[in-house]
Image (tube, grey):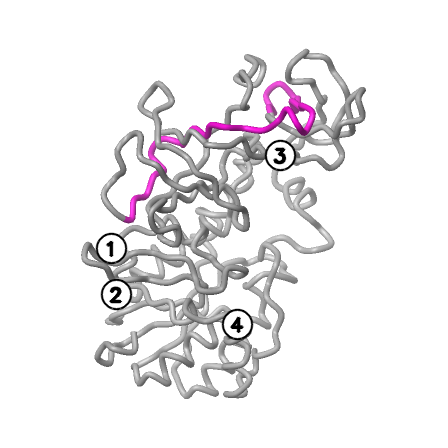
Amino acid sequence: MADLCTVKVLVAMSGGVDSSVAASVLVDQGHDVSGVTLKLWGGPSDAGCCSVQDVLDAARVADQLGIDHHVFDLTDAFDRHVVEPFVAAHVAGRTPNPCVECNRHLKFDHLLDASRRLGFDRLATGHHARIVHGRGGPELHRGNDPAKDQSYVLSMLGRSQLASLVLPVGELSKQEVRRYAAERQLRTSGKPDSQDLCFIQADQGRGGFLAERAELTPGTLVDADSGATVGTVSAVELVTVGQRRGLGVDVHGRRRVAVAVQPAQARVLVAPQDEALIDEVVLEEGTQTWTDVPLELGATVLVQLRAHGAVTPARLTSSGSTALALALDEAVAPVAPGQTAAIYSAQDPSRVLASALVNRALRSKVTPALERT
């Protein structure tokens, strides 16, 4: 944004080094900058980006930079759009990505709307991704640091949101971000990156969190091909498609992988790891976001199915109904329903074209009927 005239920018400051540097870069460029920290989680927290310490760190960096700092309380919206759906998804045998949903509903919905109402020209965050202004409008691209790229968790942004967004650290490597912060003596320069969900305590874990909010169901492990019962699990809602840990091995010593979670039947379907690979992903209707005009069926793309996963060449197809699907060029490890499929350009692999939630994935051999029930 250095080549633009001075604009009024609201920076989402999480209390981490990336958003601190994002604010500092914009101040150095001469923009009219204010910071805001979102209070999202009203319960206990010892990790993530919602702790009291994070709010204090953001406020102190803002003071160092000489900019105003605000705190917006979005706890009700966070419960409604992130926490409650997180619990409901697990109860239904799905595995959501709460960071993507927080971005979708809080940072780039509530916060973006608030920034506009308050008279700001742009909203900035510390995400490692880039916005490239092409002939057709703003495009979302991967950040310059492959190890820290966060375009996947921003893949649900549409063009109107991208037009109002600034990502000042997307051109920098993480090492350059920390060097920038150290040179300006920002108090967050040495702060570790947050790794965990902000609403789940480390000593509680996902299981403890869900157990307080839903009735968990003991269940059986069932071989997806033969239908034979091969074990048990303490709670089917805590198993994720693609999980290997705790599921044992088959008679040939091959590790088992969860290929379907079916809470209504109190069972988890498993298959040997080398037989659990998928080659088609059916997308959930109504969840697609296009950063450009929708692609035609048959279009060749690259798809990323995990936040830090590799991309796989694929073709955009139909599942036989109105739902879109991705036919993968090569079989990959199974992906859980509820996860995000981020779609990138095959011609420009850094460019995000679209995203959608995964409805289900089909195994590379004929998927047994048991997995569809």
Q: Is the residue 331 above or below the residue 79 in the image?
A: above
Disc 3 to disc 1, how far (Cα)? 35 Å
Disc 4 to disc 2, how far (Cα)? 23 Å
> Going 48% across and 59% down the picture, which residue do you hit?
149
**Residue beneath disc 4:** 15
Q: Is residue 117 visible?
A: yes
Quarter location, residue 283: top left
**Residue beneath disc 3:** 242
Do the CB atoms of the residues marked 3 and 2 lie less than 8 Å apart?
no
Of helix, strand and loop, which one carries label 2?
A: helix
On whether residue 135 falls in the magenta region, the answer is no
> Going 30% across and 81% down the picture, which residue do you hit?
31
Residue 258 in the image, given as x and y percentages of width and height: 65, 29
Disc 4 to disc 1, how far (Cα)? 27 Å
Of helix, strand and loop, which one carries label 3?
A: loop
Q: Quadrant of the C terminus?
A: top right
The mark closer to the camera, 4 or 1, is 1
> Going 51% across and 76% down the picture, which residue do you hit?
176
Q: Observer-nearest residue: 13 or 22?
A: 22
Q: Residues within 10 Å of mark 2 (few under 14, many from 20)?
A: some
> Going 34% across and 44% down the picture, which residue do you hit?
354
Q: Is residue 83 visible?
A: no
**Residue beneath disc 2:** 116
Q: Observer-nearest residue: 170 or 124?
A: 170
**Residue beneath disc 1:** 160
Which is nearer the N-term, disc 2 or disc 1?
A: 2
